[in-house]
Image: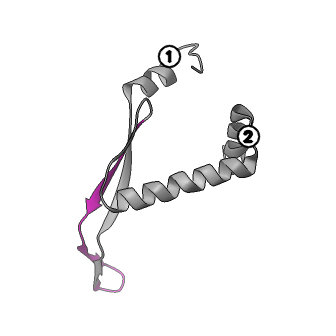
Amino acid sequence: MDSNAFVEALSEKLERKPDDIKILIDGFSSLLKEKCGDLTTVAIPGFGEFVPVKADERVEYDAESGKRMLLPPKVNLTFEPSSILKSKVFAKGGSDE
């Protein structure tokens, strides 16, 4: 499922315009970027947690050119689903409640 199909499916499910859904998704992603950039975990009850993990700067060797490069630190974002979400996803014949 690509992003356009996701927006369409979500707009039908929520009975809202696709443009409204795109605004909500953009707002959510900018919030994640802001908070997780500050290394703050974002928790959504019943859904899960977005946990930022900082990777330190490192020196990497390029075998082709023989040069060493200093790579800057970066923040990787991991998602840990809640037990409620796991049970709904893996339940057979689960409901949408």
Q: Nearer the viewer, residue 11 or 9?
A: 11
Residue at image point 44% right, 60% down: 33
Q: Amino acid at mark 2?
A: Arg
Image location (x, y in percent) of residue 73? 29, 70
Give whichever of discs 1 and 2 has the lower sequence position. 2
Q: Main secondary structure of the magenta part?
A: strand
Q: Specify the quadrant that holds the N terminus.
A: top right
In the rendered image, the vertical position of residue 9 relative to residue 69, given as above or below: above
Residue at image point 38% right, 57% down: 35
For the record, the magenta segment spans: 48-67
Question: Which residue is under mark 1?
Answer: 91
Q: Which residue is farthest top?
A: 93
Question: Which residue is under mark 2?
Answer: 16
Q: Check disc 1 and report its element: helix, strand or loop.
A: loop
Report whether 93 appears left or right of 66: right
Q: Nearer the viewer, residue 26 or 9?
A: 26
Q: Amino acid at mark 1?
A: Ala
Crowdedness near tag 2: few (<14), some (14–19) or many (≥20) residues, C-alpha within 10 Å:
few
Image location (x, y in percent) of residue 64? 36, 82
Crowdedness near tag 1: few (<14), some (14–19) or many (≥20) residues, C-alpha within 10 Å:
few
Image location (x, y in percent) of residue 47? 45, 33
Residue at image point 29% right, 85% down: 66
Per the rendering, the mark at residue 35 is: none
